[in-house]
Amino acid sequence: MIEVVRAGALTTVQDLGRPGLAHLGVGRSGAADLGSLRLANRLVGNHEGAACLEITFGNFEARFDRAATVALAGAPCPVAVSGRQKFMHGPIQLRQDDRLTVGVPTAGVRTYLAVRGGIAVPPVLGARSTDLLSGVGPEPVKAGMRLPIGDAGAQLPCVDVAPVPPMPTDIVLRVRPGPRDDWFTPAALNTLTAQPYEVSPQSNRVGIRLTGPALDRSRPGELASEGMVAGAVQVPPSGHPVVFLADHPVTGGYPVIAVVSEPDICLAAQARPGQLVRFRLARP
């Protein structure tokens, strides 16, 4: 078991989510930064889809009631085990009753804690992810919770540390126009890609809200609701874009001017309030 001593601003159980259920009204959810979750799992010898803890803005502490192997990836944080400084992006060996402390990240938003064997909470609809929008999956992690650890699988990889590039100061997201760019003026796409936008404090796992130049529409009225995907750049009546993340709604009625390339959704998930985001048209 992992005994959660301090859960920080928001800690949830996440895996690769629930793909293929949108027609039933169930979103995929899963880790907002899938690349970091996969890396943390590989470093402890888990299947890359094993359930981890997604820690938002750090300030997390847990006690382990048995020896364990853990790894952290994503937003870089100071890490300590029972007062001993440790490092991210490599396996960390814990002894019985050790306490793992994860501090506030120096960049980014979300840090992923993988435990060898995975977080073994009961699956819901085939996944262990917490979907904050729909309420599907386990409840958010709170202080005092005891989380089960599963059985270890494959052998540990022979890796001391995984080289990871630093998180960028200004984030550049590659986008492809459409599917509703024809609902905007010809200048709107140029506006989207010409100037930076600032991440709003009202951002969350559903999406990052951006402030900056408004995107002018060429059509009045609203669309009939249609399917949404992670990375969709939806534009509400204010004209300020919203980039959908893991817990996005299954459908939406505001037009989508562009969609972020899948590899860059992980970058969007690490954009913190006040940070600048730029859009760039992806090459065909």
Image (cartoon, rainbow, N blue to C red):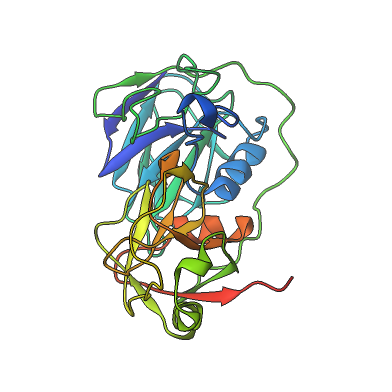
The one of 115 and 28 positioned closer to us in this rendering:
28
Residue displayed at 51% across by 49% down: 230
Which image quadrant is residue 136 in? Answer: top left
Q: Is residue 87 left or right of residue 9?
A: right
Instruction: Judge whether 50 appears above or below 121 on screen.
Output: below
Tally of numbered discs: 0
On the image, the x and y values in percent for residue 283 come to: 71, 74
The one of 241 and 182 positioned closer to us in this rendering:
182
Residue displayed at 29% across by 41% down: 10
The one of 135 and 95 positioned closer to us in this rendering:
135
Q: Is residue 281 left or right of residue 96?
A: right
On the image, the x and y values in percent for residue 68 come to: 53, 27
On the image, the x and y values in percent for residue 237 come to: 28, 63
Q: Is residue 53 left or right of residue 145?
A: right
The one of 90 and 98 positioned closer to us in this rendering:
90
**Is residue 167 something that shows in the picture?**
no
Residue displayed at 45% across by 72% down: 184
Which image quadrant is residue 106 in? Answer: bottom left
Instruction: Judge whether 184 appears above or below 110 on screen.
Output: below
Residue displayed at 33% across by 49% down: 58
On the image, the x and y values in percent for residue 141 come to: 31, 29
**Is residue 28 something that shows in the picture?**
yes
Instruction: Judge whether 57 appears above or below 108 on screen.
Output: above
Q: Quadrant of the C terminus?
A: bottom right
Q: Is residue 123 left or right of residue 80?
A: right
Point out the residue furthest to the front here: 220
